[in-house]
């Protein structure tokens, strides 16, 4: 039975996360405004955050780890997206390594921050259209990579990158494999840092691979994955998204909750307080709108936790992960926008963070598959169509 009850220890962990996140919020504007360069680091080191001691033993019960992961992500982003700078090592490539790497590969690159490079100038949502190539040089036992990647989150800051490339363009999805390329490898260059609407605390990079040679064992999933279905191939790495898509929803919902709480506080100053016990016709229109946003956020939270719970129980969650991402991304986008609508000029003033949260939240409905693509996946799963039949 699905149960989201938290252990006492996990409640205490979340409380610590909340305090750290609220501290990071103080630096949110600084990082937003210093996007152009790598801003000097002003955030306190993670280990200098004061954490309250945690209960030693778990008196209640074990929380599903994936559920706890989502709650932590929401809490951190409730503080501010800036917390990503202090979340320690890890990028989307690390999730791919965990999902598809051999035990030796997982051990070898443990502790390194790995970005994930799929998107290309001519290929976004339709990731099977990848043009980057990987050719095996049998004589030297090396892969030779050629191609261009854009919009790689943490591409500048990462130690390396998991790159999608095709062994055979005619083979579509079947030809696509992923490779680990570390910074400093000749032929691998980060060429550009994007200037963005939001999430400016995080870098987004473009990169090129020109006759970039990497050892044969940098193929994710090992050499067997060339012939094996899944592994480091398209399907295997797509499974990464079943873990990370709910997390993107959770990022968005953390931001949306911050926006809503700020809006409620500001409106309360003006005397707008929600009376939950009153009948709808007895409440003000503004209170009614706040309740609608609140309900939307609650629904998204349930979708996100549901999909995470399934993954934590090792049950399939392909559809639920897409529902969590679609709902989380949409609510993040619309809730922050509606909060600006409720506060008017205060909502777009840079004196406050609401306008920034509006900008930061927008990406959660774009990367790791847009809202439209999530709906496509959900429709396929429900109707029983293949990707070829419904695209
Ligand atoms: C800040 C940021 C960070 C990113 N980080 C990464 C990263 O780390 N790694 C990485 O590889 N990529 C990353 N991306 C790229 C991101 O995943 C792509 O932008 C996304 O997949 C959409 O691709 P596209 O931009 O080419 O849009 P397109 O695929 O060209 O789509 C344009 C529009 O058409 C819609 N659309 C497309 N196909 C369909 C369809 N079949 N049915 C209905 N609607 C459709 C889309 O939903 C979208 O609204 C990042 C992007 C940004 C902006």
Image: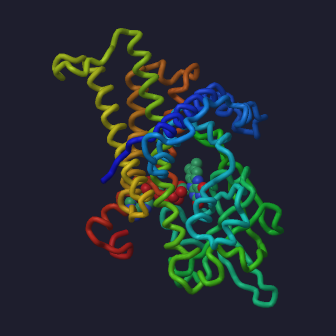
234 with respect to 165 (left or right):
left
Image: 264 above or below 160: above
Q: Which image quadrant is residue 112 in?
A: bottom right
245 with respect to 135 (left or right):
left
Q: Number of numbered discs present? A: 0
Q: Residue 23: image x %, image y %?
A: 63, 27
Q: Residue 81: image x %, image y %?
A: 58, 38
Which residue is at 25% across, 22% downward? 276
Viewer-proximal residue among 213 and 71? 71
Which residue is at 43% across, 45% downward? 61
Query: Which of the image's four quarters has the C terminus?
Result: bottom left
Image: 96 above or below 287: below
| Colouring method of the image | rainbow
Which residue is at 76% across, 86% downward? 137
Viewer-proximal residue among 304 and 33? 304
Which residue is at 52% across, 53% downward? 367
Q: Residue 301: image x %, image y %?
A: 38, 42
Work out which residue is located at the far bottom of the displayed protein and give it: 139
Image: 205 above or below 259: below
Q: Residue 156: image x %, image y %?
A: 73, 51
Image: 273 above or below 322: above
279 with respect to 171 (left or right):
left
282 with respect to 342 (left or right):
left
Viewer-proximal residue among 194 and 323? 323
């Amino acid at each position: 039975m699905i149960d989201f009850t938290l252990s006492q220890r996990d409640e205490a962990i979340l409380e610590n996360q909340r305090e750290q996140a609220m501290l990071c919020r103080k630096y949110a504007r600084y990082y937003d405004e210093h996007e152009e360069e790598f801003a000097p680091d002003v955030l306190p080191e993670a280990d200098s955050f004061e954490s309250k001691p945690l209960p030693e033993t778990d008196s209640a019960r074990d929380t599903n780890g994936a559920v706890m992961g989502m709650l932590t992500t929401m809490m951190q982003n409730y503080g501010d997206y800036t917390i990503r700078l202090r979340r320690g090592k890890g990028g989307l490539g690390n999730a791919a390594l965990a999902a598809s790497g051999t035990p030796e590969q997982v051990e070898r690159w443990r502790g390194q921050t790995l970005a994930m490079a799929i998107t290309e100038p001519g290929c976004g949502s339709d990731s099977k259209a990848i043009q980057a190539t990987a050719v095996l040089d049998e004589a030297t036992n090396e892969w030779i990579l050629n191609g261009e990647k854009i919009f790689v989150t943490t591409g500048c800051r990462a130690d390396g990158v998991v790159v999608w490339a095709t062994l055979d363009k005619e083979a579509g999805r079947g030809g696509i494999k992923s490779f680990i390329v570390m910074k400093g490898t000749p032929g691998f260059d980060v060429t550009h840092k994007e200037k963005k609407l939001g999430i400016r605390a995080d870098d987004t990079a473009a990169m090129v691979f020109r006759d970039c040679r990497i050892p044969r064992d940098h193929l994710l999933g090992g050499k067997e994955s060339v012939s094996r279905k899944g592994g480091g191939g398209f399907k295997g790495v797509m499974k990464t998204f079943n873990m990370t898509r709910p997390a993107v929803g959770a990022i968005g919902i953390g931001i949306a909750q911050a926006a809503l709480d700020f809006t409620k506080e500001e409106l309360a100053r003006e005397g707008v307080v929600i009376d939950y016990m009153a009948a709808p016709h007895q409440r003000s229109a503004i209170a009614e709108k706040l309740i609608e946003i609140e309900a939307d956020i609650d629904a998204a939270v349930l979708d996100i936790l549901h999909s995470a719970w399934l993954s934590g129980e090792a049950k399939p969650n392909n559809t639920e992960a897409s529902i969590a991402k679609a709902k989380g991304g949409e609510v993040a986008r619309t809730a922050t926008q509606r909060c600006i609508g409720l506060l008017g000029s205060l909502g777009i003033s840079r004196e406050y963070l609401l306008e920034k949260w509006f900008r930061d939240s927008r990406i959660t409905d774009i990367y790791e598959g847009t809202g439209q693509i999530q709906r496509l996946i959900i429709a396929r799963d429900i109707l029983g169509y293949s990707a070829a039949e419904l695209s």
